[in-house]
Amino acid sequence: MAMTKSASTMHHCAESTHCPFAVDATACMGNIRLFAGLPLEAKHELISNARRSTHPNGSILVREGDPIESILILRSGRIKTFHIDATGEEHVLDVLHEGQAIWHGMFLKDHSYHYSVACLSKVELCSIHRTDFEAMIASHPDVAMGLIRMIETELDDAEEKITMLSIRDPKQRLAEYLLHRDARCIGSEIMLKLDDIARSIGLRPETVSRNFSSLEQEGYVTRLGRGRLKVVDREGLKSISMLSD
C-alpha cells in the first residue's frame, strides 16, 4: 500500500510503555467494532505485531486500487476517505478521527481499496497486517460468528448513511449526521471541524456553518472549541430529523 514504512516512522507497538497512546496492552483497539468481540488473548496476539507510523497533514495514506495489506487504526488526528470521479471531482465518503479504523474491503476477494485515504491533520496510525488478523481468526474460530454480526452492523450503518445523504433539507441532514456521529464517538464530544462535516455530508461549509449556528441557538448543540462539538439535546435533534420515529 501507499504508506511509507521507513525506520524513522514505523516501529512495533508491543512495548505499551513506549506507546504515548496506550492505557493498557490493547488500548488502540478498545473502542473499535472490528475488535470488540475478540478475547483478550487474541488482542494481545495482534498488538504484539502491530506497528506505529506518523504522517503529516495532506499526505496520502492509500490510493484507490492499492492492495489492502493492513488494518489502519487512527491513534490521533483526522483522515478522510474519498473518491475522484472521471471528471476529476473529489467526493468525500467519510471523515474519521482517533479511535476509528480503516479496514473495509479487507475480506473481499481482490483485497483492494475502492477509495483513497488522506490526512486532514498530522496523523498517528497503528497498523495490523491483514495476514496477522487472518491467522488470528484461524487460531480462534470462535470469533468468526462475532465478526459476521459486526459486518452486518457495518452494512446497516452504510445503509443509514445513504439514507441520510438523500435528505434534501440541509438542516435536517446536518441534524441526522450529528446524531449519527454522536452515537459513534468516543466520549461525549464530536471531534470534527465544520469543514470536515461539510465534506462528509455533501454540503458547502457556509451552509453547514449557518445551520449549525441555528441548531446552537435553539439549544441542540454547542461548540466547545476549534474542532470540538457536543450534542446537548438528542431528542431535540431527533425532532427535526426526517429519520426520527
Image: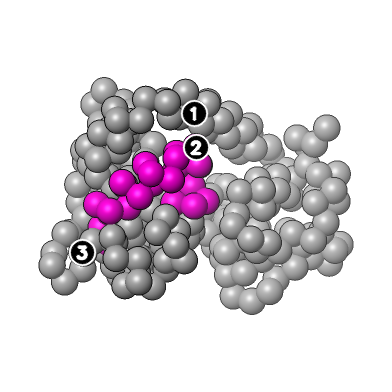
| Residue farthest bottom in this picture | 225
Q: Residue 213's spot in the image, x, y percent?
A: 75, 66
Asked if labels 2 and 3 touch by Cβ distance under 8 angstroms, the answer is no
Q: Of the numbered discs in the image, which one, if any, rests on residue 146?
A: 1
Asked if labels 1 and 2 touch by Cβ distance under 8 angstroms, the answer is yes
**Mark 3 and mark 2: Cα distance apart in space:** 28 Å
Range drawn in magenta: 28-52
Q: Which amino acid does label 1 sit on?
A: Gly
Q: Residue 229's spot in the image, x, y percent?
A: 66, 66
Q: How many labels does the image show?
A: 3
In the rendered image, which residue does mark 2 sit on?
37
Residue in the picture at 29% in, 27% down: 138
Please rate how many residues cluster around mark 3, counting C-alpha atoms within 10 Å: few if below 14, some from 14 to 19, many from 20. Answer: some
User: Disc 3 on helix, strand or loop?
Assistant: loop
- The answer to whether residue 241 is seen in the rendering is yes
Q: Which amino acid does label 2 sit on?
A: Gly
Residue in the picture at 30% in, 35% down: 136
User: Disc 1 on helix, strand or loop?
Assistant: helix
Residue in the picture at 74% in, 59% down: 231
**Mark 3 and mark 1: Cα distance apart in space:** 31 Å
**Mark 2 and mark 1: Cα distance apart in space:** 6 Å
